[in-house]
Image (cartoon, helix red, strand yellow):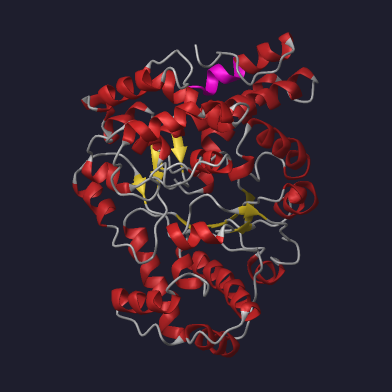
Amino acid sequence: MLIHQDRLFPAEASTRKIAKALYEQVRTLPIVSPHGHTQAAWFAKNEPFPDPAKLFVQPDHYIYRMLYSQGISLEELEIGEPELLDARRVWRIFARHYYLFRGTPTRLWLDFAFQELFGLDQRLSEATADVYFDTISEQLRAPEFLPRVLYERFNLEVLATTDSPLDSLDDHKTIRESNWKARILPTFRPDPVVDPEFAGFSENIAKLAEKTREDASTWTGYLNALRKTRDRFRELGCTATDHGHPTARTANLSSAAAAELFYRVLAANADAQQQELFRAQMLTEMAQMSLEDGLVMQIHPGSARNHNRKLYEQYGRDVGADIPMPTNYVTALRPLLDQFGNERGLTIILFTLDESTYSRELAPLAGHYPCLRLGPPWWFHDSPEGMMRFRERVTETAGFYNMVGFNDDTRAFLSIPGRHDLARRVDCAFLAKLVAEHRLDEDEALEVAQDLAYRLVKQAYKL
């Protein structure tokens, strides 16, 4: 076996027994995936995935980031190519370097998929590369590996994508019109039209105006265009927005000051501080819109995006060269919270890449303000140790019920079951420790385990 049935459970026998009993009660619960980066086109077209390299290597920055760190070029991996010229060669490179993933959550997710989906029981290596490639390729051609069948096989109840406000959402429309009963929902990610540093910002505003038939060159028209776009997303089932800002800074400018700032950034006459102030103001504007239309607001700050400038210039955004930064929440969120913090009809989910904020800032904030909830460990901390650190540092102040369960935030579709399984195991291990220490009764731990795996995410994201 590639993965042990007791993986991630406590080593101590009596506590492990409690964890296993809890896990058995949540193991088969439906998966709700409220935030991720899979492609609606996969399910709209429902075509076979082409090959193992295209399926596992190309979309997963966890994989090619690690390989790149060891001197393997993205050209060798054919990253960014619409079609792979030599998929087997790419796969062999990956297999030859699979040892690099020892001790990482990526290894756990991949081995889960290899064993549970494809029945492979030998470790991936240079020696087994072709066996893997041929076995997976053959199975991908079978009807039971079509995207829609896999969605059902994974026991997915909801799968949310992440979409630009300029996206037509045609793939989501196709899915709906097909009468397939799956819930694949768009998520409104306005970064291209609210971040002045986003490539083509002014051109994006012009496209937004064209799509909405609003004069987005004016402050009022721009806000109306955003409201119309949110409505378009909501018509296709969207329940959440997502904001990938460099910081968590918010602002509450007067309408006149906000309009003046907007004209400056639209004309590309804003300096770095003014660009940051505009992003800060737009978080507050988005909170106002969420209060109006009910969309849940997610804030993912603290990543120095596209840190490797050479790769960004060659490949564009999202090639795995993002680095965590220290992030302030207490001061940064205050203008927004002064305005909306006590609103029970608003839900803002905070994420962080700065673990130092867990017990100092995030848990106390979420443990007080009715509008705030804490998202799960994200990205670099989406790991067994990261999840356990989060539970240990946040629960004592915020409790379990100011959290929102788990989301996988993945581009790699086949990793979804493994990621959720990992989270459920870690949560059961944490809860088993509380039971063993007589801090929770076992019936309470079971209820919390079910809440963390299933009920909290549905409640938080209005699903």
Residue 231, quarter of picture: bottom left
Q: Looking at the image, how many numbered discs can be counted on the residues?
A: 0
Q: Which residues are magenta?
A: 21-29
Whether residue 419 is visible? yes
Whether residue 242 is visible? no
Q: Residue at x 65, y 64 (%)?
A: 247
Q: Residue at x 54, y 19 (%)?
A: 25
Q: Could you tell me residue 410's position as x and y percent?
A: 47, 42
Q: Is residue 190 left or right of residue 342?
A: left
Q: Could you tell me residue 355's position as x and y percent?
A: 73, 47
Q: Is residue 228 left or right of residue 112?
A: left
Is 415 one of the magenta-colored residues?
A: no
Compared to residue 353, the image places residue 339 above or below, namely below
Compared to residue 416, the image places residue 370 above or below, namely below
Viewer-closest of 338 and 265: 265
Compared to residue 1, the image places residue 138 above or below, namely below
Residue 398, quarter of picture: top right
| Quadrant the C terminus occupies | top left
Q: Residue at x 71, y 51 (%)?
A: 354
Q: Is residue 205 left or right of residue 97?
A: left
Q: Could you tell me residue 15's position as x and y percent?
A: 72, 14
Q: Could you tell me residue 414's position as x and y percent?
A: 40, 32
Q: Main secondary structure of the magenta part?
A: helix
Q: Residue furthest top?
A: 13
Q: Residue at x 70, y 52 (%)?
A: 366
Q: Residue furthest left?
A: 178
